[in-house]
C-alpha cells in the first residue's frame, strides 16, 4: 500500500455496486413525481432573487474608515512607479508588471538574507475569515472568523482548530435580516455541525505537509531540504506539476481538477513562504513568482490584524469558494518578505482587506520553530 | 434551452442519481430519497443561485440536509455502517485481492477505522468523482483546506492498512478504541471527528 494511486483505487473499489442500482431505481420511480411536486409547490417558477454574491458584495464598504477611503482616492490619483521595497508611506496603486517583478525579486533578496533556523516543531498560527452560510447555503452577509494552530514535527503533528470563533455581519441590515429569519445556525470554516464553536485538537503521526495539487506529501525534513536555487526549485515543481504518467483515477494531476501551472506555483508559494523552508528556498520561490505572467501589485494593503503589506496577484490565478471564483492575492511584508496573508477579497491600495467581501482571508499571525507541541515559539 | 423548467429537468436528470448516491452513504433509502428530492426543491427555489457546475452545490445542500435530519433526532448512519449494509455478494466476488494485496474485508475494516471526516474526504474524490476544488465546494472550505483533509485521510488509511498487514487482530482493537485513536496517540477531546462531518 505505498502508491497514492493504489490507495485511492482501493477505496474506489470498495464502493458498493448497490449504490448505482438503488440510484437508478429511485430515479426511474421518483423523477416524474419530484418534477411535478416542484411545479406544484412553486408554480410561479424559480425565485427571482439575484444570483448569489459573496457576503457584502455590491454593498457599500461599511468597514472602511474615512481615512482609508481618502487613501484610496489618493492612490487612484497618484499612480507612480516605484523602485525598492516600497519605502514610501503614501499608498500607491502600482500596475506595472516590471514593478511587480522588481518587488518580488527584492523580496527574494530579503528572504535569502534571513538566518537559517531549525527546531523540533514548525508552528503556524492562522486566523481565517470566510463567508458563513446557513444550512440551505443561504447567505445573510455573515462572516466567520476562527484561529487554527498547528505544530508539525518529523514524527508527530498536532492541530487545534476553531479557536476564538466569532461571527460578524457586513452590515446591521444583514444582521437584522438574519435575526428576522429566526437566527438560522451559521456554518464555520471546517464545516462542523452548525452552531458548534468549541476548539478541538487532533494529533497525527508523521503526516508532514500536504503538497499542493495532489503532488504528494512532504515531511518536515523534506520541506527543509527543498531546492534553494531558482533552477532547482523550478525543476522540482515542474516535475510535480506534470504528475505521474499513469491515470490518477478520474482526477488528480492530469484530471479535470488539474490546476494551471501558474496556480500550482502560487499554491506552492503559500506552502513555502509559510512553511519550514530554508531562506534559499523562499528566495527561489520569489524568483519563480517574478517570472509569472499577469503580475500585479498593490501597495499599502492592511490585513484584518492591522498589518500593512504589498498585495501581489498573478493574472488568472483564482480560487473558488462556495461556488464563486475570486482572484487570489499574496500579502507580503516588504520589510521582511514574510507572507502576511492569503486573500481572495478585493484589495485596493491604502485599504483594509474587508473580511465581508470576497471568498475569504487567511492571515498568518505567527510562524516559527518551537520545541514542544502546545507551545508557541519564543518571542 | 432557455426555459428554466426544462433546464431544471435537465439538471435533475443529470444529477439526481449522484445526489442520491451521496445521501445513501448517510441515510437509509427512504430518508436518502427525501434528502435528494429536497435538495432539488431548494435548487428550484433558489434557481438563480445555483452555480455551474451544479453538482458540488447540490451535494453541499444534501450534506446540510442530512445534518439537519440528525439534529432533528433522526438517526444519521455512520458511513462505515452504511457501506457495510450496502455491500453485496457481487462486491465481494468482484474484489481483486491480487490487485489490491489485501482482502476486501480487511480493506473495509481499515476504512471503517477512520473517522467520518476522513471517510467523507476519501469518498468524495473516489466514489463521487469530484476533483479537489469540487469536493472543497461540497464541504464549504477552500481547496487548500480540502487538500490537507484528503492528505491526512490517505495517510491514516495507509497506516490502518499497514497495521492490518502487521497485526491481523489490530482492527478489532482499533474499533474498540474509536476513530482517531489508531495511531496510539492521545484520544482526541469530546469533539470527535465524526461529529464534525
Image: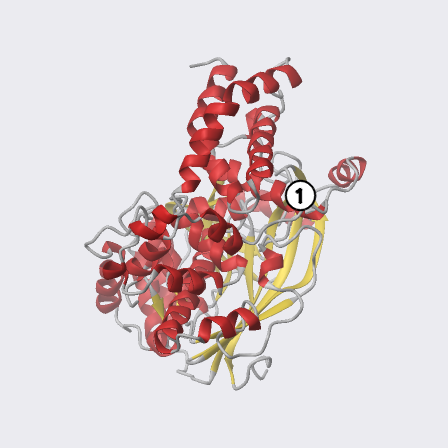
Q: Which residue is mark 1?
A: B69
Q: Residue furthest left?
A: A245
Q: Nearer the viewer, residue A184 or A365?
A: A184
Task: Give the quarter of the image for residue A25.
Answer: top left
Quadrant holding the C terminus of chain B: bottom right
Camera sees residue B52 = no
Residue shown at the point (20%, 53%) measured from the top left: A246
In the foreground, A81 or A55: A55
| Other-residue count near label 1 (Cα within 10 Å), few / some / many at <14 / 14–19 / ≥20 | some
In this view, the residue farthest toward the front is B89
Residue A52 spot, x, y in % from top left: 58, 32
Asked whether B48 or A118 is in front, the reply is: B48
Residue B76 or B117: which is nearer the viewer? B76
Whether residue B117 is visible: yes
Residue A188 in the image: state x and y as whole percent: 63, 53
Quarter the N terminus of chain B occupies: top left
Residue at left 65%, top 71%?
A: B189
Colour scheme of the picture: secondary structure
The answer to whether A50 appears left or right of A235 in the picture is right
Residue B176, how many percent across, how many down? 56, 71
Q: Residue at x 51, y 42 (%)?
A: B24
With respect to residue A192, does B11 lie above or below?
A: above
Q: Is residue A123 above or below residue B114?
A: below
Label 1 marks a residue whose chain is: B
In the rendered image, which quarter is residue A51 located in?
A: top right
User: Regarding mark 1 in the picture, which secondary structure is present there?
Assistant: helix
Horizontal arrangement in the rendering, residue A152 relative to residue B162 (left or right): right
Point out residue A230 in the picture as x, y percentages from the top left corner. 25, 67
Amino acid at each position: 500500500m505505498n502508491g497514492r494511486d493504489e490507495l485511492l483505487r482501493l477505496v474506489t473499489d470498495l464502493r458498493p455496486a448497490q449504490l448505482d442500482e438503488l440510484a437508478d431505481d429511485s430515479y426511474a420511480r421518483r423523477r416524474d413525481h419530484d418534477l411535478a411536486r416542484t411545479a406544484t409547490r412553486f408554480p410561479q417558477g424559480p425565485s427571482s432573487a439575484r444570483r448569489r454574491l459573496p457576503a457584502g458584495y455590491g454593498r457599500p464598504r461599511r468597514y472602511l474608515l474615512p481615512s482609508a477611503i481618502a487613501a484610496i482616492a489618493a492612490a487612484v490619483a497618484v499612480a507612480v512607479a516605484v523602485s525598492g521595497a516600497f519605502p514610501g508611506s503614501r499608498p500607491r496603486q502600482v500596475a506595472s508588471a516590471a514593478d511587480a517583478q522588481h518587488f518580488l525579486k527584492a523580496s527574494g533578496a530579503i528572504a535569502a538574507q534571513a538566518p537559517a533556523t531549525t527546531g523540533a516543531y514548525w508552528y503556524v498560527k492562522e486566523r481565517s475569515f470566510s463567508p458563513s452560510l446557513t444550512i440551505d447555503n443561504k447567505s445573510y452577509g455573515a462572516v466567520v472568523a476562527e484561529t487554527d494552530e498547528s505544530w508539525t514535527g518529523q514524527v508527530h503533528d498536532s492541530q487545534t482548530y476553531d479557536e476564538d470563533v466569532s461571527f460578524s455581519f457586513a452590515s446591521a441590515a444583514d444582521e437584522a435580516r438574519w435575526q428576522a429569519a429566526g437566527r438560522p445556525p451559521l456554518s464555520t470554516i471546517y464545516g462542523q455541525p452548525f452552531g458548534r464553536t468549541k476548539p478541538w485538537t487532533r494529533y497525527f503521526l508523521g503526516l508532514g505537509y500536504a503538497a499542493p495539487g495532489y503532488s504528494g506529501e512532504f515531511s518536515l525534513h523534506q520541506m527543509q531540504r527543498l531546492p534553494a536555487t531558482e533552477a532547482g526549485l523550478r525543476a522540482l515543481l515542474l516535475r510535480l506539476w506534470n504528475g505521474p504518467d499513469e491515470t490518477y483515477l478520474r482526477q488528480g494531476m492530469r484530471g479535470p481538477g488539474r490546476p494551471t501551472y501558474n496556480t500550482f506555483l502560487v499554491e506552492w508559494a503559500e506552502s513555502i513562504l509559510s512553511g519550514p523552508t530554508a531562506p534559499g528556498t523562499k528566495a527561489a520561490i520569489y524568483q519563480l513568482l517574478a517570472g509569472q505572467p499577469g503580475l500585479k501589485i498593490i501597495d499599502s494593503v492592511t490585513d484584518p490584524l492591522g498589518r500593512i503589506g504589498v498585495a501581489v496577484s498573478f493574472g488568472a490565478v483564482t480560487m473558488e469558494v462556495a461556488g464563486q471564483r475570486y482572484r487570489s492575492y499574496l500579502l507580503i511584508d516588504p520589510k521582511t518578505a514574510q507572507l502576511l496573508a492569503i486573500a481572495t477579497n478585493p484589495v485596493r491600495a491604502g485599504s483594509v482587506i474587508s473580511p465581508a467581501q470576497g471568498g475569504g482571508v487567511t492571515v498568518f499571525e505567527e510562524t516559527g520553530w518551537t520545541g514542544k507541541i502546545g507551545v508557541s515559539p519564543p518571542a | 434551452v432557455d426555459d428554466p423548467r426544462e433546464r431544471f429537468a435537465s439538471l435533475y436528470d443529470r444529477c439526481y442519481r449522484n445526489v442520491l448516491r451521496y445521501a445513501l452513504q448517510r441515510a437509509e433509502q427512504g430518508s436518502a430519497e427525501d434528502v435528494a428530492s429536497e435538495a432539488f426543491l431548494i435548487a428550484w427555489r433558489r434557481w438563480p443561485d445555483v452555480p455551474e457546475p451544479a453538482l458540488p452545490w447540490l451535494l453541499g445542500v444534501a450534506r446540510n440536509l442530512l445534518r439537519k435530519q440528525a439534529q432533528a433526532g433522526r438517526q444519521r448512519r455512520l458511513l462505515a455502517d452504511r457501506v457495510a449494509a450496502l455491500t453485496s455478494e457481487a462486491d465481494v466476488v468482484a474484489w481483486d485481492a491480487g490487485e489490491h494485496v489485501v482482502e476486501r474485508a480487511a480493506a473495509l475494516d481499515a476504512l471503517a477505522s477512520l473517522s467520518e471526516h476522513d471517510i467523507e474526504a476519501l469518498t468524495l474524490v473516489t466514489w463521487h468523482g469530484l476533483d479537489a476544488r469540487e469536493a472543497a465546494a461540497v464541504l464549504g472550505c477552500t481547496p487548500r483546506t480540502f487538500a490537507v483533509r484528503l492528505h491526512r485521510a490517505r495517510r491514516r488509511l495507509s497506516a490502518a492498512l499497514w497495521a492490518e498487514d502487521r497485526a491481523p487482530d489490530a482492527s478489532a482493537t482499533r474499533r474498540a478504541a474509536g476513530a482517531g485513536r489508531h495511531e496510539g496517540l492521545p484520544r482526541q477531546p469530546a469533539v470527535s471527528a465524526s461529529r464534525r462531518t
